Image (cartoon, helix red, strand yellow):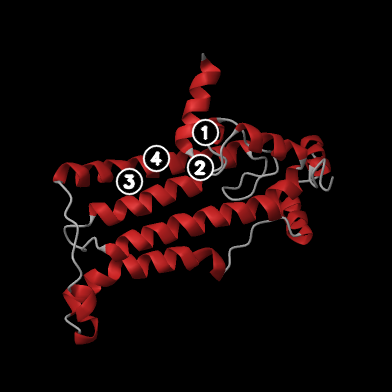
Amino acid sequence: MEYDEGKIKDLVEKLGTGELTPKEILKILNKQGIRHKESWKDFIGSALWGILCFLPGIAKFSNFEILDFFAQLPAIKFPMVVIYSTIIVIIFVICIEAYVIYWRKKKGGLGSEDDTIILLKEGPFRIVRHPSVVDWTIGFTAITISLSNYIPFTILSVIGNIVLITTNYWGTLIEERELNLKKWGNEYRQYMKEVPRFNFIKGLWNLRKKRR
């Protein structure tokens, strides 16, 4: 089976012995094509989300006749308790993301918040395989609700949030196939069996069962 042992096992060993530095390993990952590079494709979902969710608000405040249709879309009104709850969620998301970055920099082997050569399976990575993606997906969705008194939450907001969730989920599929499985091989396949990709509720439930 392709990538049974992964492509970076020797790099981890050389890092441990001091034969290679983190900076040198990053260059090697880049040459091997197993280092994530951000491109315009990574921002399609977020761009569409922003356009769909904020267009009614822009139409409302700009008074451009061409946007009248969007300004007149029926808006969903949320109780203040829901709005305050989403603000708390956003703060929580920021704290969790800071924790995720700490784990990548501290435990990932390269001192980087983006690149790792050691497969992280503890901390937030015990709950879901892509905690950052889950974090920001929840956070961005919460933003559309928390600002709904100022930027109307319409059917476009619902569609925008669905687009964001779908594209983010699709991005994790690509990352696993193009990067993670090539990096860690069977170790990552086993991790995939043990920890859900996106379903943090299932992840928390699995963690609870393990602690019994």
Q: Position of residue 206 (x, y in %)?
A: 52, 26
* Residues tagged 2 and 1 counted as in contact (Cβ below 8 A): yes
The three-letter amino acid code for the residue at tag 1 is: Ile
Q: Is residue 19 visible?
A: no
As measured in the structure, the alpha-carbon distance from the residue carrying label 2 to the one carrying label 3 is 14 Å
Q: Which residue is mark 2?
A: 131
As measured in the structure, the alpha-carbon distance from the residue carrying label 2 to the one carrying label 1 is 8 Å
The three-letter amino acid code for the residue at tag 2 is: Pro
Q: Position of residue 42 (x, y in %)?
A: 54, 63
Near mark 4 (Cα within 10 A), the count class, few <14, some 14-19 or many ≥20, is: few
Residue 81's image quarter? Answer: top left
Kindly state the secondary structure of the residue where label 2 is placed: helix
Q: Position of residue 53 (x, y in %)?
A: 31, 65
Kindly state the secondary structure of the residue where label 3 is placed: helix
Kindly state the secondary structure of the residue where label 4 is placed: helix
In the displayed structure, does residue 209 sit left or right of residue 27? Answer: left
In the displayed structure, does residue 156 sit left or right of residue 64? Answer: right
In this view, the mark in front (4 or 2): 2
